[in-house]
Image (cartoon, rainbow, N blue to C red):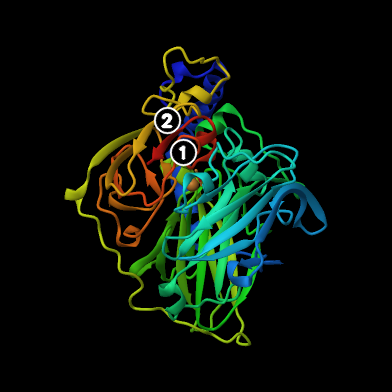
Amino acid sequence: MRQIKSLSHLGKQIMVIDKSKRNLMYGLGGAGIGVLALSAANRFSFISKTTFKAASNELRIPPLLDSRNGQNIAIDIQDGKHEFFPGILSQTKGFNGSYLGPTIRMYKGETTKITFNNLLDEPTTIHGHGLHVDGRWDGGPQNIIKPGEKLEYQLNIIQQSGTSWYHPHFMGKTAEHVHAGLAGMYIIEDQNSLSANLPKRYGIDDVPLVLQDRTFINGVIKTYSVTPEQIMQGLQEDSLVVNGTINAYKDVPKGWVRLRLLNGANARYYKLTLDNGGSFYKIATDGGFLNKPVPISELTIAPGERNEIMIDFSDGLDKRLLADFQSPEGEEFFTSLFTSSHSVLEMRVNTQLEPRGSLPVNLNDIRPYNINDVKVTRHFELQMGEGGEEGQSNSSMDTHNMFSINGRSMDMAFINHESKKGQLELWKISGENMRHPFHMHGTSFLILSQNGNEPKPEDQGWKDTVNVDEGVTEVLLKFDVTADSQSPFMYHCHILEHEDAGMMGQFTVL
Ligand code: C2O
Ligand code: CU
Ligand code: CU
């Protein structure tokens, strides 16, 4: 059992909570070997025999806004009332709707104008996670849209096809705003994706899936609030919501189906499998296609990550995608005892739907960087509990300064480093105490080593978010766009509670 280190740096309240949790753990451990053995057996039968009732709600598909349709795209950021359970309304936030937002399709080589109109009664920012655009269009913490104001973005798309997303990035409020429902997908197309013989009918056989966990009390969403302990561990809730739908089903053609998965959770990792134990193919990472499809039978997706997978329904059998909830603290014995499977999507074969597209043999032509071309090596140590500059306040309830990178909590007035456009860099990243999904703005990288190991074949693609732990993760990257000190790029942990509490830094690219 890993314990949170450096308790002396935490407020008294956290110590009490943590101690009672530890007592609870010991209490369980002390219940005896017989009980533990029984639990393990239960767990096996639980996982292999979990049966789900037929899903009751048709999967919501976010509306598609295609930038080639001529009109400029206008998005209202608004408060809403969303119906998660029939007849019960929850207070939420959304883009042009009550929860989440439209999928926006853009094309490489074209500039898309999008106006975000802030109808909330508070300021926010809208960041394009995964986009390679100049800092002024990045929507970082400096690019504030005040209540009643709007901002027109000009997104000049220079990157290859892939699935990115947009979400607020207001300093200290990202977790709350995303949790309320503010997230949407960007789909980028290019010559390669348009000519590939893949399923590409949006919402039919090319299906966006935004995965989030939320708490419901009598059918009403629990609005965002966190205890100091939840800031430490990241907010982990117990009901799975997919595209704002609970317990979702979807009709699919008797052929190939492509799923664009986005982990939009505040902190949870999801381990995805098919209920028949069968394999599926991963075809894309965060920033584009893999060179070839990689067959896998389970896929762990960290907060902020996207993956595209292909599932074959030509056998005519219905299948269910499952998610095991995982804590960032990992799969240690106790947590794994309580791992539970959730239904992401019940997929029902409907022979009325004509199958189209297939699984290509080749998808991409990724040219690896040459390590000998590296001009700068940077180190990033994600820290909990021991950070904070000398002299920064550290009152007992001020968790902010306990979260840091390289000993420094996020400070909007301080530029942590300067990168040079076009220069190859090696970033070496590690994180304390638990897994952290590390992300940086403005580019995609290739993984050289992940937590000390060679990256798995299904991770050898363009990425902007990577799961790091105490081992060293090395990534190679360069920037094709610029960001000045007025609107710098961020790097941070994508556990949103950690990000808001200061596990973030900023840099320019000139
Ligand atoms: Cu998805 Cu800086 O964020
Ligand atoms: Cu981002
Ligand atoms: Cu973290």
Badge number at residue 212: none
Instruction: Dividing the image into four quarters, tell me where ligand 3 lies.
Output: top left
Q: Compare residues 462 and 466 and report the one nearer the observer.
A: 462
Give SS at disc 1.
loop
The residue to which callout 2 is attached is 415
Q: Residue furthest top?
A: 391
Question: Is residue 344 left or right of 416 when viewed as pictured?
Answer: right
Which corner quadrant of the image does residue 506 belong to?
Answer: top left
Q: How many labels does the image show?
A: 2
In the rendered image, residue 290, in percent from the top left (x then y), is placed at 35, 66
Spatial CA span between label 1 and label 2: 8 Å
Q: What residue type is labelled 2?
A: Ile
Amino acid tagged 1: Pro
Q: In which quarter of the image is residue 405?
A: top left
Image quarter in which the N terminus is found: top left
Q: Is the residue marked by circle 2 packed among few (<14), some (14-19), or many (20+) residues within 10 Å?
A: some
Query: Is the C-beta separation of discs 1 and 2 under 8 Å?
Result: yes
Residue drawn where x is 79% and y is 59% of the image:
86
Q: Name the residue under label 1.
A: 488
Query: Percent x, y for residue 327?
Result: 48, 43
Residue 412 picture location, percent across and down? 51, 29
Residue 462's x, y, as percent? 36, 58
* SS for callout 2: loop
State which quarter of the image contains the C terminus.
Answer: top left
Q: Residue placed at 53% from the left, 30% from the top?
A: 501
Residue at the limit of the structure toward the right, as seen here: 87
Whichever of callouts 1 and 2 sits on the residue coming sooner in the sequence is 2
Query: Can residue 508 be seen here?
Result: yes
Q: In this view, does 405 lie to the left or right of 70?
A: left
